Amino acid sequence: MEQSYNSVLLDSAVAELSKLPGIGHKTALRLALHLLRKEPEISYALGNSIIQMRRGVSYCPKCHNISEGGVCAICSDTHRDPTTVCVVENVKDVITIERTHEHHGLYHVLGGLISPLDGIAPSDLEIDSLVKRVDEDGIHEVILALSPTMEGDTTNFYIYRKLSDLPVKVTMLARGVSIGNELEYTDELTLGRSILNRTLFSANNVK
């Protein structure tokens, strides 16, 4: 931990803030000093909200989306189509797709993408639980909504092979989403159209 301020407490706060993704040491220092300049209640509210989030937010045992207790709000919504499941990499992608208002089914969050270079194997992801859902819950369509990157295509193909013996239609987003882009950076209009114009998945999609 860098120590260049005459305060152990400030050093500690900067060190903790810099552990957050995308927050370097200089940004962490700027944030810490900003909080010191503001009313104490702002810091207390921030700290308490983070503590409450960690205590109250967990993961849905069914789809692995975030939940505030048991099955998440989306899985519990009786107005959604329970026979269609949209497969995404992470919770951020659920939020992104929900903003399009074009998907009315359920979700399945993998928790990552297959990436041998990063040491992420299929067994590290929620793929087996997806196959179990399709086999047991009467799923008619699985929409593969993964980022069109090499890792995303590899994961798409692996899931497609795992589902090939089950009576389910496997579709993928139309390629209005630019190749190589992560899903969360795609604008809502393009993403919404890609969901509506989804196509059947085949092995040719990843060649």
Image (cartoon, rainbow, N blue to C red):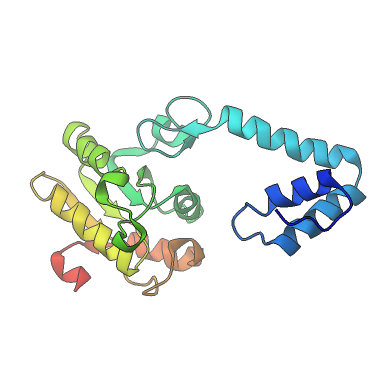
Res 173 seen here: no
Q: Nearer the viewer, residue 88 or 102?
A: 88
Number of numbered discs overlaid on the protein picture: 0
In this view of the protein, can residue 194 be seen by the observer?
yes
Q: Is residue 123 left or right of residue 202?
A: right
Looking at the image, residue 119 lies above or below residue 130: below
Seen as rendered, the residue at the extreme top is 70
Name the residue: 43% across, 70% down.
Answer: 181
Quadrant occupied by the C terminus = bottom left
Q: 111 or 198: nearer the eye?
A: 111
47 to 70, vertically: above or below: below
- Residue 49 percent location from the top left of the image: 70, 35
Relative horizontal placement of residue 30, taking residue 119 as reference (left or right): right
Return the x and y of residue 18 as percentages of the image width and height: 67, 54
The front one of 140 and 2 is 2
Could you tell whether 152 is left or right of 4 in the image?
left
Residue pictured at 19% horizontal, 61% vertical: 200
Q: Residue at x 39, y 70 (%)?
A: 177
Quadrant position of residue 50: top right
Q: Position of residue 133 (x, y in %)?
A: 24, 36
**Eyeballing the image, is 69 above or below 144?**
above
Q: Position of residue 183 (x, y in %)?
A: 44, 62
Q: Is residue 75 left or right of residue 16?
A: left
* Residue depicted at x 78% and y 55%: 3
Q: What is the residue that sits farthest to the left in this orientation? A: 165
